[in-house]
Amino acid sequence: MKNHRVVAGVLFALLIIVLSACGGGGGGGGTTGYVGPITSIRLEAIVEGTSTVVDPSNIFVNEQVRFRLTGIDEGTIGQPRIVLPSGAWTLTGTPGGTLASDGLFSANSTPTGFFGTAKATFESINYTSSVRVVAPEAIMVGHGRLTNGNPTPNVQIQALNSSGTVVATGLVGADGTIRMSVPTTAVAFTTAFPSDYYVRQFSFAGKDYATTVNGCFAPLPTFTLGQTTSMSTDVVFYSTFDTSPPPPPDGCS
């Protein structure tokens, strides 16, 4: 009987060691909820209570937006994109709202006209995003992606009036969503790129437009104050790593 107790105790101790080595479903660095390694980390802003990803520099007045970090868990079967256990969120500047430590941003009823910066940390690396609250005029929605379908976060969309003056800007969201406030005077758009990863050209509604060509703008639909209008097609961008170059910019006239 005594030998049985010893064997049982040894087996129990070995079980504890195995579970500890496996992490019990947790991740490295003392955090839990993933296996790892984590790749393709991105900062997302989601309208609270929905799955709508938005541009954090175009948060609407009185809106609540949840900031979060997500990444691909390569150690899990299927390599899902998961919400990461980031440190406390902080906000600097006066963007027109408050940010709770859990990532919930609450916009005020009046914009300040200024930007702020939201920040969180994951595995000792800081992730930041510009934040701004706006009072929406007309609302433009669409989708930005690469030729392979992947989203193009942080590419800037610039809305222009008939004189070619930029009247509104917005960023493509983490999942490719475009949602931004535009005045009813906006009639065309162009883009600006965050890095040399992108070719300075994009495709829209069957035409290609080069941002290096002066006045080469893509048309926008007619906007109505207080209403949401969709762009007619996706805005498609080209990567410098594409195996073939983009076609000539036939939208420039």
Image (spheres, rainbow, N blue to C red):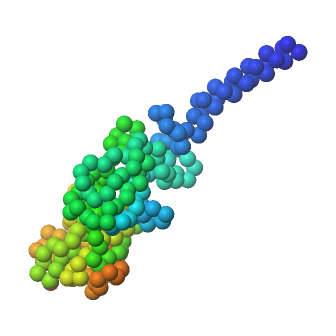
Which residue: 26% across, 57% down? 95
Q: Nearer the viewer, residue 12 or 103?
A: 103
- Rendering coords of residue 15 (x, y %): 69, 28
Farthest residue, direction right? 1
Residue 87 lies, with reference to residue 163, above or below; the image says above
Q: Quadrant of residue 150?
A: bottom left
Relative horizontal placement of residue 154, taking residue 25 as reference (left or right) = left
Farthest residue, direction front? 109
Residue 194 lies, with reference to residue 22, above or below; the image says below
- Rendering coords of residue 168 (x, y %): 21, 71
Task: Look at the image and tell me in which quarter the C terminus lies.
Answer: bottom left
> How many labels were placed on the picture?
0
Q: Quadrant of residue 142?
A: bottom left
Q: Nearer the viewer, residue 201 or 152?
A: 152
Relative horizontal placement of residue 102, taking residue 79 as reference (left or right) = left
Residue 159 lies, with reference to residue 120, above or below; the image says below
Task: Look at the image and tell me in which quarter the N terminus lies.
Answer: top right
Which residue: 49% across, 37% down? 31
Residue 148 visible in the current orientation:
no
Q: Quadrant of residue 114?
A: bottom left
Which residue: 48% across, 51% down? 83
Which residue: 34% across, 46% down? 90
- Rendering coords of residue 20 (x, y %): 60, 29
Residue 101 visible in the current orientation:
yes
